[in-house]
Image (spheres, rainbow, N blue to C red):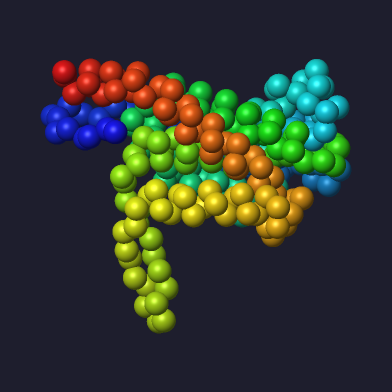
Amino acid sequence: MFIPLPSRRKPSLRWATPALFALLWLAFLWAKTRHGAMQDDLLREWGALTGMAGVLDGHAALRLVTALFLHADWAHLLGNLVFLLIFGLPAEQAMGPWRFLLLFLFGGAASNLAAALAIPAPDNVIIGASGAVSAVIGAYLALFPTAKLGVVLPLGLFLEFVKAPASLLIGIWALLQVVFAYIGPAFGAVAWSAHIAGFLFGVVFALFVRAAIARRMRKRMGY
């Protein structure tokens, strides 16, 4: 458990999350300059492919990473960007930018690999940063198990802002990913298995580097 301690030192610069935010935007806008068959060819060339043939492809490792920066549409992109900012900024503040980049890239690649092996249909294209963002959510939960998140609830004609335990909200979200993997909406079009694998990767990653993070925080606080 990490307990925030008062310090007069300025917080370290968080540049990894904004950089990833910008890269995801730029990659999406760049892909949108392609039209029709050219865009389909782009997604197939740089997206991850399902099935053993796709996993054993000579460029499979690179595809697992480049697929993170490709998105199907605006809704797909914006959903990932919102969750990246909510959970990425505090996670990066705790673990530092370089560990956070490793979490995002390796967590995303691992989640895409899991989805490529879990989806039975061969040669389907997997794209999007959802698995990497799920890894960030898992790491956030492991780093801040007692944190609270603000939730806006519609109550009739009014909106009520309430705080709820992050562990409860993230737990519900994780449970839904498991359920949706079997009976969820857009089955086959959404790689729910990537969300699950990414989330588990994030939890394990945060626990694995927890001692190093604690040393970093003590050093930053001057202890």
x, y percentage for residue 24? 58, 38
Tell me if 146 is positioned left or right of 21 in this view.
Answer: left
Residue at image location 54% in from the left, 31% down from the top: 201
Height in image: 128 above or below 9?
below
Compare residues 14 and 175 and report the one nearer the observer: 175
Determine which quarter of the picture holds residue 180.
bottom right
x, y percentage for residue 191? 69, 45
Query: From this viewpoint, which residue is outermost toward the bottom?
Result: 157
Locate the C terminus by quadrant: top left
Asked whether residue 97 is in view, the answer is: no
x, y percentage for residue 63? 72, 27
Residue at image location 26% in from the left, 24% down from the top: 217
x, y percentage for residue 119? 77, 41
Locate the N terminus by quadrant: top left
Residue at image location 85% in from the left, 42% down from the top: 121
Tell me if 213 is positioned left or right of 218 in this view.
Answer: right
Compare residues 138 and 14 and report the one nearer the observer: 138
Height in image: 119 above or below 63?
below
Determine which quarter of the picture holds residue 183.
bottom right
